[in-house]
Amino acid sequence: MTRRLILAMLAAWAALPCLATQVEVRGAVDAAGTRQLAARARLSDAALAAHVHLDAYFMGAAWLRPSLVVAQERQKAGLLFDLDSLQRQATKEERDDLAQLASTLSSWVKSMPATGRQVALLDPRALEVKASENWPVAEGDTLYYPRRPDTIHIVGAVARTCTVAHVALQDARSYLRDCPASRYADADWIFVVEPDGRVFRQGIAPWNRSAPLPLAPGSTIVVPISEHRVSSVAPDLNTELADFLATQPLPETTPQP
């Protein structure tokens, strides 16, 4: 190999872009901000580089991915369309309080961003031993580590949004005593949005009562609108609402209706 060829190869190598991945980490971490990681870095690399605090609430941590934002914007648009359809139908039937509930929920959803959240294990040490959960990160991703909250939120077909104290081992339906329901609330089901972004449907009526479901701090209970009120207009409305709420990370700042 000639000296000229070697020099040309070295020059070409030097001109190649630096293979690195920039990921933002924020919340309960020592090194908040944008971290430059090696190419093909994984979730554990980003978390360990940021030095997550011992008091961070791993169950409420969030992985926010720009690559998922467009899909979640469509998800949000579909939910808003269904809420608008319900409002128009309720107005036509002169059910003003149902129309107002749909309008209130619509305004609330409009205020929420499409975050790109993806459900994932985000405990840095657990990721090191669970290779199947240790996903690659991509340019522009964000990891957010909140601190542990001490409340439960109750939203949806309620007289007003409620924030109540978390009680260890208390069943989800027991929290409903502290939050008056709308006359249009479904009497049979609730949805539970866990702080890690997972969603569960729980039966609360005598005929379908589910096993007790203790909630993690920071969970959200979604009281659905009665199925027979929405089935002819937007049959998936309640599921859509719970699924979209699951994309919202714990506050920093999460607006309430």
Image (spheres, rainbow, N blue to C red):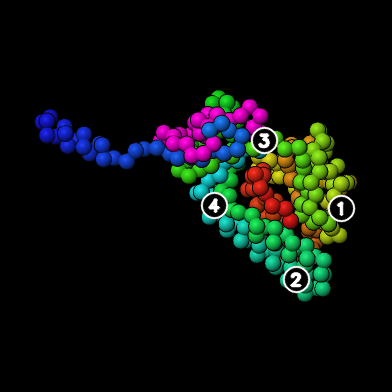
Identify the residue position indicated by label 2 in the image.
89
Q: Is residue 84 above or below residue 55?
A: below
Graded by Cα atoms within 10 Å as few (under 14), some (14 to 19) or many (20 or more), the crowding at tag 1 reads some
Along the horizontal axis of the image, is 15 left or right of 218?
Answer: left
Q: Position of residue 235 (x, y in %)?
A: 72, 60
Residue at the disc numbered 3? 147
Tag 1's secondary structure?
loop
Does the magenta portion include 48?
Answer: yes
Q: Marks 3 and 4, how far apart in space?
A: 25 Å
Question: For numbered disc 4, what is the local secondary structure?
Answer: helix
Three-letter amino acid code at the position of disc 4: Val
Q: Residue at x 58, y 43 (%)?
A: 118
Quadrant of image for the C terminus = bottom right
**Along the horizontal axis of the image, is 5 left or right of 197?**
left
Residue at figure coordinates x 84%, y 43% from the top left: 175
Residues under labels 3 and 1: Cα distance? 29 Å
Name the mark nearer the viewer: 2 or 1: 1
Identify residue type, mark 1.
Pro
Query: What residue is shown with label 1?
Result: 180
How many residues crowd around disc 4 within 10 Å: few (fewer than 14), some, or many (20 or more)?
Answer: some
Provide the residue span drawn in magenta: 32-58
Residue wearing tag 4 = 69
N-terminal-most mark, 3 or 1: 3
Considering the image in quadrants, where does the N terminus appear? Answer: top left
**Alpha-carbon distance for marks 2 and 1?**
24 Å
